[in-house]
Image: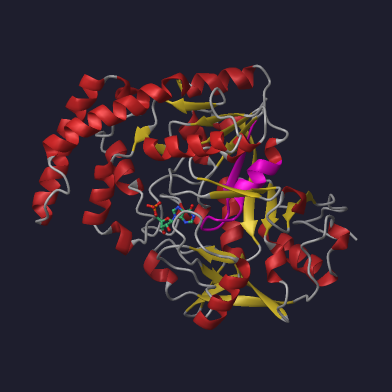
Amino acid sequence: MPATVIVGCQWGDEGKGKIVDYLSGRMDWVARYSGGPNAGHTVKLGGEIFVLHLIPSGILRPGIRCVIGNGVVLDIDHLLEEINSLEKRGVGVLGRVFLSGAAHIIFPYHRWVEELQRQDVRVGTTRRGIGPAYQDKMGRNGIRLLELLDRRWLRERLDGELARVETLHAAYGRPMPQSRQEARETWSRHFSSVAAFLEPMIADTVTLLQDALDRGERVLCEGSQGTFLDIDLGTYPFVTSAPTTAGGAATGLGLAPRQLAKVIGIAKAYTTRVGNGPMPTEFAPALADRFRRQAGEFGATTGRPRRCGWLDLVLLRHAVRVNGIQEVCLTKLDVLRGFRSLKIATAYRRGRRTLRTPPLDAREWNDCRPVYRSMKGWSEPVTGARAWKELPAAARDYVEGIEESIGAPIRILSLGPGRESTFPMPKVRSTGKGIAARRR
Ligand code: IMP
C-alpha cells in the first residue's frame, strides 16, 4: 500500500494539523518527517483545542500509530511535556508513538548558538534551536536520540560539542550562559534519564514503516511548515533549515519516492507568513491589523502576529509542481467573508517583465508587484455550510477561480476549526484542458 503525503503550499500555518486529523480516520499510521518543535498544529475536537508541536496530529484518532521520523529534530524535554499533557487529557500516547533513534537532538546550546548568530533577529525564527541543530546534523556533529541511551558516551559527546560551542562564544566575545563542565555533567544526567523513559518508544522507524507498507497498511506522511519555507525550494535565506516539501518525506522517513503515491497540498484561502522575508501580496498595515484579529492569525508556537495578505497563485502553482500535488485542500475560506471584492495574485510584475513563477533570488522578490484579478466577495457567513452547494455563489466562484489556474483540483474544503467543518468537494464534472471545474 503506497503512502500519502500532506504538504503546506504557502509559508506554513495552512491548517495541516486539522486536515491530517480529518484524513487520519482512513489511515493506520501518521508519520512526521521533518522540522521540530517550531511547528504548531492546532486541532479542535468538540470544545477542546489541542496544539501539537512534535507528535503527529493523528494521535487524536484512537487506533492510529504515530512515527517521528529520522528527518525530525527532537527537543526531548518538549516531547516529554507534550506526551504528559496528552496523557493527562485522556489521549493515550504510550505504545502508539514510535521515535526514530536516528532523529537528531536539540540541546540547549543550539538555542544559545541561534541567539549568538542572531538568526532569531535576521530570519525571525521561532527561537527553538532548529537551525543550529540542523547545522550540526549536516556538519556531522549532531547527536542522535539513540546516543542518549549510553550516559558515558553521551557525556563524552557533549564534552566535544560544548568545546566547539565554547570556541564560538569566544569568537563572538560572549560568555557561555553555563560553563562547559557544568553543562556536560547536568545534561548528560538529565538527557540520558529522559531517554531512558522514552526508550520503549525508540525504534528503527524506517523498518517499522516499510513493514507496515508491506502488510498493506496505510501511511500518512505529515509535513510541517510550508513549501516556501523549504531549505532548498523556499524563499532562501528566509526559510527554515529542513525540507518541508514532499521529497522530504522520502529521506525523512526512509520511504522510496515511488512509495509516495499521493500528495495532498494544503492551502489557506489567503496568504500568511510568520517571520521575515518576501511576501508580495501582503496587506497594508491597517487592513492587516483588522484582518488578523478577525482571522485569529497569531502563531501557534510563538504567539507572534502573522503577516496577512491576498491569495498568491504564483506560489500555489509552483507548490503544485514541485510537490507533485494531485489534490488541494483549501482552508479558512470562512474568514474571507465581508469583503466587497477579493484579490488574487495571478502573476508578478518586475520592471517590464511578467513573472508566472517565483524568482530564485530573495533580493528580486522585493521588486515584484503582484498582478491581481478581482473576485466578488460575499457577506453571508459560510462557517455553518457542510456541503459545496450550501456556499454562496461568490464563494464558489472564488474557489473555482483558484482551481482553474493552479493545475490541481480542490478536493477538500475546510470552513472552520472543528472536524465537522471539513468536507469533500463534489467531483468535477468535466475535465478538459486544465481543470474545468463547473460543479453546478
Ligand atoms: P525556524 O524554523 O525556527 O528556524 O524559523 C525559520 C523561519 O520559519 C521563520 O520565519 C519562522 O517564523 C518560520 N517557521 C518555522 N516554523 C513555522 C511554522 O510552523 N509556521 C509558520 N512559520 C514557521
The magenta-colored residue range is 3-22
Is residue 333 depicted above or below 109 in this figure?
below
Q: Is residue 350 left or right of residue 388?
A: left
Kindly identify the residue that appears in the image at 32 percent across and 25 percent down: 193
Q: Nearer the viewer, residue 53 or 30?
A: 53
Number of numbered discs on residues:
0
**Residue 62 place in picture, x, y as percent:** 67, 30
Quadrant in which the N terminus appears: top right
Q: Quadrant of residue 342?
A: bottom right
Q: Quadrant of residue 309?
A: bottom right
**Residue 241 place in picture, x, y as percent:** 38, 48
Q: Is residue 217 visible?
A: yes
Kindly identify the residue that appears in the image at 39 percent across and 60 percent down: 238
Q: Is residue 163 visible?
A: no
Kindly identify the residue that appears in the image at 41 percent across and 50 percent down: 231
Q: Is residue 15 magenta?
A: yes
Q: Nearer the viewer, residue 157 or 195?
A: 195
**Residue 316 place in picture, x, y as percent:** 60, 59
Quadrant in which the C terminus appears: bottom right
**Residue 344 place in picture, x, y as percent:** 65, 72
Q: Is residue 214 left or right of residue 278?
A: right
Ligand 1 located in image quadrant: bottom left
Q: Is residue 126 magenta?
A: no
Q: Nearer the viewer, residue 87 or 63?
A: 87
Is residue 172 depicted above or below 397 in this figure?
above
Is residue 53 depicted above or below 195 in this figure?
below
Q: Is residue 253 left or right of residue 65?
A: left
